[in-house]
Amino acid sequence: MQEPVIVDCQPGMGPITTYWSNGSVTGYSDYCQSVHDQALAEEVAANTPVCDGAVCTYPSGAQVVDPSANQVVIPYTCGYDVLCDEAGNVIPGPESGVMLGNGWMCAGNGCTRP
């Protein structure tokens, strides 16, 4: 009698199931484990974007902002929106408060655009 051969494996990410030529069904086999590992690698690749520092592009073509990208800073005007030093760096507002050019009172640490 001829030894049974593998005719199919359980598809997808479920448990390893092996279907044999004699009609029997068993669990693990080296071959079906390799099929499973390949399916998993393809699934990971299909859901792994390529990021360029600004945009991450998925294999499907979908794009999202690269989370590692520098965050966009809302522009501000020194003395109008925020308090700045001579070099243009934002400085903390005084505890007593300072009236900015836009009419807002700026006070406390990190005095920035409200």
Image: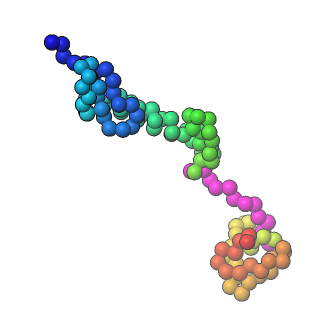
Q: Is residue 99 above or below residue 41?
A: below
Q: Looking at the picture, tell me which residue is in the foreground, 88 or 102.
A: 102
Q: Looking at the picture, tell me which residue is in the foreground, 63 or 50.
A: 63
Q: Is residue 14 above or below residue 75?
A: above
Q: Which residues are magenta?
A: 68-79
Residue 71: within the magenta? Answer: yes
Q: Looking at the picture, tell me which residue is in the foreground, 78 or 19.
A: 19
- Residue at horizontal 70 percent and vertical 78 percent from the top: 93
Residue 38: quarter of image:
top left
| Percent coordinates x, y for residue 107 in the rendering | 71, 81
- Residue 49 is left or right of residue 96, and the answer is left
Q: Quadrant of the N terminus?
A: top left
Q: Residue furthest left?
A: 1
Q: Is residue 84 visible?
A: no
Q: Quadrant of the C terminus?
A: bottom right
| Percent coordinates x, y for residue 67 in the rendering | 57, 51
- Residue 71 is left or right of residue 105, and the answer is left
- Residue at horizontal 46 percent and vertical 35 percent from the top: 43
- Residue 57 is left or right of residue 96, and the answer is left
Classified by dominant secondary structure, the portion drawn in magenta counts as: loop
Q: Is residue 10 above or below residue 21?
A: below
Residue 10: quarter of image:
top left
Q: Residue furthest bottom?
A: 96
